[in-house]
Amino acid sequence: MKILVVGSGGREHAIAWTLLQSPNVEQVFCAPGNGGTATMANCQNLDLAVDDFPGIAQAVQDYQISLVAVGPEVPLSLGIVDYLQQRNILVFGPVKAGAEIEASKSWAKDLMKEAGIPTAKSETFTARDSAKVYIEKTGAPIVVKADSLAAGKGVIVAMTLEEATNAVDELFNQGFNTLVIEEFLTGEEASVLALTDGQTIIPLLPAQDHKRIGEGDTGKNTGGMGAYAPAPVVTSEIMNRIQTEILQPTIDTFNKRGIDYRGILYAGLIITPSGDPKVIEFNCRFGDPETQAVLPLLETPLEQLMLACAQQELSAQPPLRWQPGIAVCVVAASGGYPDAYQKGKAISGIESINDAIVFHAGTKLEDGQLVTSGGRVLGITAVGENFESAIAKVYAGVSAITFEGIYYRRDIGYRFNI
Ligand code: AMP
Ligand code: GLY
């Protein structure tokens, strides 16, 4: 079969790569893809923006594509799935009404309240004054979040009252008109990405993302500087609780609201010191870079699972099969990221890596030369028998790569034994 992957990041390269591991997948197209998907065997980039729905529907016809898999949240929240379904195209991803779970934090909080899902206490505000009064009353630390999509830049974890009130002003000044202010939770973070067909929901291996730019999880928040899976903080007992207390109630509540949610439901969690899982956010898609750590361990053919989700046949699937071991993904970024950075730097060394997989994110081919074109440039993933061997392999790979200004964290995976 032929599959079209929508998006251009490391996550989409990993999805395309995993799909192509299956003998049933003949060809993958990426809209628009990146330098990695441009050069992968049996993969072809299409010059289509992720929100060019008519162009994507036309490509499905022109290339006889059987399934569209949508990576990023923006086209999902703009209704790409509704658009394609109306044209009888099979698609992996939630409808617009379901993507609200990521597109609006207050909407997600309402759903969690209705479903009785454990999460941080919160209030929603549309005026600065009332937001500040609430902060004064509640005290710090406290978390201030823009309600709408903000590409990872709309959350301020304020340790003092002053930081929190400044965050309110900053977000309103940036043009956000609704804020969610919530209780600060402590514990270990984990990401659980779950496959769903709107009825059945099956979690993938739990992962942990390293969101901060600096070693020791310090400095600014980023899209994610690395990830590993499976994350031992999510024991099988905690995973069972996540299934019954979080994932299934979310799907049940979607159904109560008449929303047929198919695709990935991503639960961003904090596991509290007493071992209770609580939701800090939901996303309506695969995580980036969690996907680059989770999918290389998946042995069940991905296209089979995506089809089962799109056709509501997930309950008939046998249990997922996983390669034993640990996968670690390290992101190589452009110097300066997540602030301003330069683009167009020549990348070399990828061909010399044989013990790790190189997923491209911000790269493109310019006159046959691979150059940087984004903040997160590459995600290098290695699989090992244990953490030590996966970490040693991944850093042997990363150190072979050069481009001007390359920056990566040297401690990805360190929390595995915390
Ligand atoms: P989000 O975009 O909602 O995932 O938030 C980005 C990051 O902010 C998370 O990965 C957490 O590290 C942190 N964060 C968000 N909400 C909370 C919370 N209620 N308590 C503590 N940290 C939080
Ligand atoms: N790695 C965090 C995210 O995908 O939202």
Image (cartoon, rainbow, N blue to C red):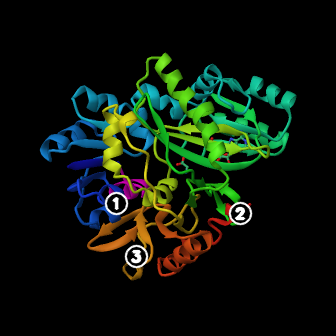
| Mark 1 residue type | Trp
Q: Which mark is residue 417?
A: 2
| Mark 3 residue type | Ala
Residue 152 appears anywhere in the view = no
| Mark 2 residue type | Asn
Badge 2 element: helix
Residue occupied by mark 3:
346
Mark toward the viewer: 3 or 1: 1
Of callouts 3 and 1, the N-terminal one: 1
Residue 15 part of the magenta segment: yes
Of callouts 3 and 2, the N-terminal one: 3
Badge 3 element: loop
Depth order, front residue of 389/147? 389
Q: Which stretch appears magenta?
A: 7-16
**Residue drawn where x is 66% and y is 43% of the image:** 238
- Ligand 2 closer than 8 Å to the CB at disc 3? no
The residue carrying pointer 3 sits among few (fewer than 14), some (14 to 19) or many (20 or more) residues within 10 Å by Cα, namely some
